[in-house]
């Protein structure tokens, strides 16, 4: 949907079928241009973690449930970028361009930090085929309800930071 840039600027909304127009780093375009990463391929993919042989990135496809914003956590990563693609349903993701990282933030999993502060400057709506990229340290609060809580299905790519300069 919106591509988030480290400089703090935001691009126009895009969907996965026209992503070459977004100006993504070459490394991310290489991933999204793969035949097994097209929207029809992602829609057909079984739920679960998928990592193509020889690749350092991986993708998790599966269902989740949206909740009111007050019930959702804000997260960030240092070593990974996220590409989040909506496959079914709709969500709002609240995000910011400034790091919220603070000493003492909970590291729930390796490189998954939960921010105590949740100030966001952007609200992004994802619907079928829309995607957003979150660069390292960019806070994002995903799976927030649009109109009402719903079951959604997403593909979330975890991409090592080295792909951002490739």
Image (spheres, rainbow, N blue to C red):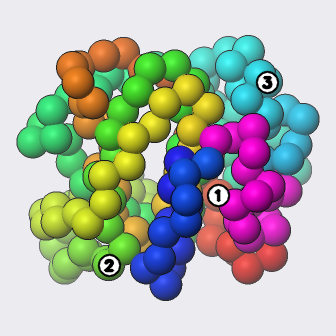
- Against 162, is 120 above or below? above
Tag 3, which secondary structure? helix
Across and down, in percent, residue 61 comes to 59, 27
Q: Residues within 10 Å of mark 1 (few under 14, many from 20)?
A: many
Res 67 → quadrant: top left
The label on residue 41 is 3
**Picture residue at 73% right of the left edge, 79% below the top:** 165
**Picture residue at 49% right of the left edge, 61% below the top:** 134
Q: Which residues are magenta?
A: 15-31
Earlier-in-chain disc, 1 versus 2: 2
Q: Is residue 78 visible?
A: no
Q: Residues within 10 Å of mark 2 (few under 14, many from 20)?
A: some
**Closer to the camera: disc 1 or disc 2?**
2
In the displayed image of the protein, which residue is found farthest to the bottom? 7
Tag 2, which secondary structure? loop
- Against 161, is 113 above or below? above
Q: Is residue 44 visible?
A: yes
Horizontal side of residue 94 vs 51, given as left or right: left
**Picture residue at 46% right of the left edge, 37% below the top:** 126
Magenta residues: mostly which secondary structure? helix
| Along the viewing direction, whichever of 30 and 22 lies nearer the viewer | 22
Indicate whether residue 118 is drawn in magenta.
Answer: no
In the displayed image of the protein, which residue is found farthest to the front? 12
Identify the residue under disc 2: 98
Which quadrant would the C terminus be assigned to in this image? bottom right
Res 122 → quadrant: bottom left
Across and down, in percent, residue 47 comes to 60, 18
Indicate whether residue 17 is drawn in magenta.
Answer: yes
Mark 3 and mark 1: Cα distance apart in space? 19 Å
**Closer to the camera: disc 3 or disc 1?**
3
Identify the residue under disc 1: 159
Horizontal side of residue 134 vs 85, given as left or right: left
């Amino acid at each position: 949907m919106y591509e988030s840039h480290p400089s703090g600027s935001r691009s126009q909304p895009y969907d996965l079928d026209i992503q070459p127009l977004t100006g993504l780093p070459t490394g991310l375009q290489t991933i999204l241009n793969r035949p097994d990463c097209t929207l029809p391929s992602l829609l057909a993919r079984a739920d679960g973690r998928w990592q193509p042989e020889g690749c350092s990135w991986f993708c998790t496809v599966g269902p989740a449930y949206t909740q009111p914003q007050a019930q959702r956590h804000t997260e960030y990563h240092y070593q990974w970028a996220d590409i989040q693609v909506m496959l079914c349903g709709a969500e709002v993701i609240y995000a910011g361009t400034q790091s919220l990282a603070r000493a003492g933030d909970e590291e729930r999993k390796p490189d998954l930090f939960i921010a105590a502060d949740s100030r966001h400057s952007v609200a992004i709506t994802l619907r079928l085929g829309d995607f957003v990229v979150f660069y390292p340290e960019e806070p994002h609060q995903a799976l927030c309800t649009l109109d009402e809580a719903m079951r959604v299905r997403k593909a979330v790519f975890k991409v090592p930071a080295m792909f951002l300069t490739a």
